[in-house]
Amino acid sequence: MNKIGIFFGTDTGSTRLVAKKIYSLLGADVADKPKNINRTRVEDLLQYNALILGTPSYGVGDLPGLAVGCQEANWAEFVPHLDGVDLSGKRVALFGLGHQERYASRFASSLIQLYRVFYGYGADMVGRWSTEGYQFQFSDSVIDNQFVGLVLDQRGQAHLTDERLSAWLAQVTPLLLAKQAEAA
Ligand SMILES: Cc1cc2nc3c(=O)[nH]c(=O)nc-3n(C[C@H](O)[C@H](O)[C@H](O)COP(=O)(O)O)c2cc1C
């Protein structure tokens, strides 16, 4: 597939909204319409060599899903289906939502779980993001002083989302497109 695939999990709709913003910023020539991960088969995702994946944060050390109280299936229900796949030909950029004021001690905690899954299956992970401008005590999703993907806070810093998205997409889009060109 010569477009970027966008997949998201969500419980209350914010991650879907951000995925739609990403799609409209990239345009239909560059990306396919975002798809909820709970309506995605592994084959759908594996069609793409370049992926943008988004997750909200629910709980410590967990992917969002039914076990942590989400209303619908989410990443936790999808990930077991990846068992044994080889993602070494894929380039993946992640974004994660969280609420830094309310969950300051575990901010954007699910992002690292998604990172570990895709990194673990061999994907080339891109799109790290500075922690500057956020106020939190601790986040598992920080490695070497950077978040492992773009972090957005739609509860406390929604006014910064568009600016952050544009800057992050300027960083990751060329890397994702280069991967497609390589694979074509
Ligand atoms: C029960 C519950 C647990 C949450 N746990 C965390 C958390 O551990 N870390 C965090 O940063 N945000 C946490 N949040 C905030 C959500 O990740 C945030 O509101 C996000 O925007 C929701 O995205 P969604 O609308 O796509 O589901 C939690 C919210 C709820 C309601």
Image (tube, rainbow, N blue to C red):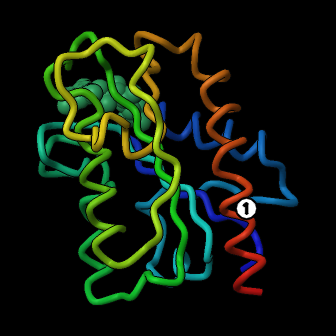
Apparent side of residue 3 relative to residue 108 in the rendered image (left or right): right
| Quarter the C terminus occupies | bottom right
In the image, 86 versus 126, the foreground residue is 126
Q: Secondary structure at mark 1?
A: loop
Outermost residue to the front = 144
Percent across and percent down for residue 112 are: 27, 49
Q: How many marks?
A: 1
Apparent side of residue 128 relative to residue 85 in the rendered image (left or right): right
Q: From the viewer's perspective, is residue 75 above or below residue 159?
A: below
Q: Is residue 12 visible?
A: no
Q: Residue at x 38, y 16 (%)?
A: 134
Percent across and percent down for residue 154 are: 46, 20
In the image, 148 versus 24, the foreground residue is 148
Q: Residue at x 43, y 19 (%)?
A: 132
Percent across and percent down for residue 136 are: 25, 16
The quadrant where ligand 1 appears is top left
Task: Report if the beta carbon of the residue with label 1 is closer than 8 angstroms to ligand 1.
Answer: no
Q: Which residue lies under the disc numbered 1?
A: 32
Q: Is residue 179 visible?
A: yes
Percent across and percent down for residue 93 are: 52, 55
| Quarter the N terminus occupies | bottom right
In the image, 123 versus 17, the foreground residue is 123
Q: From the viewer's perspective, is residue 60 above or below residue 103?
A: below
Name the amino acid type tagged 1: Asp
In the image, 179 versus 162, the foreground residue is 179
Q: From the viewer's perspective, is residue 2 above or below residue 168?
A: below
Q: From the viewer's perspective, is residue 135 above or below residue 27?
A: above
Q: Residue at x 70, y 56 (%)?
A: 33
Q: Check disc 1: other Cα within 10 Å, few if <14, some if 14-19, many if 20+.
A: some
Q: Quadrant of residue 143?
A: top left
Apparent side of residue 13 relative to residue 86 in the rendered image (left or right): right
Q: Quadrant of residue 171?
A: top right
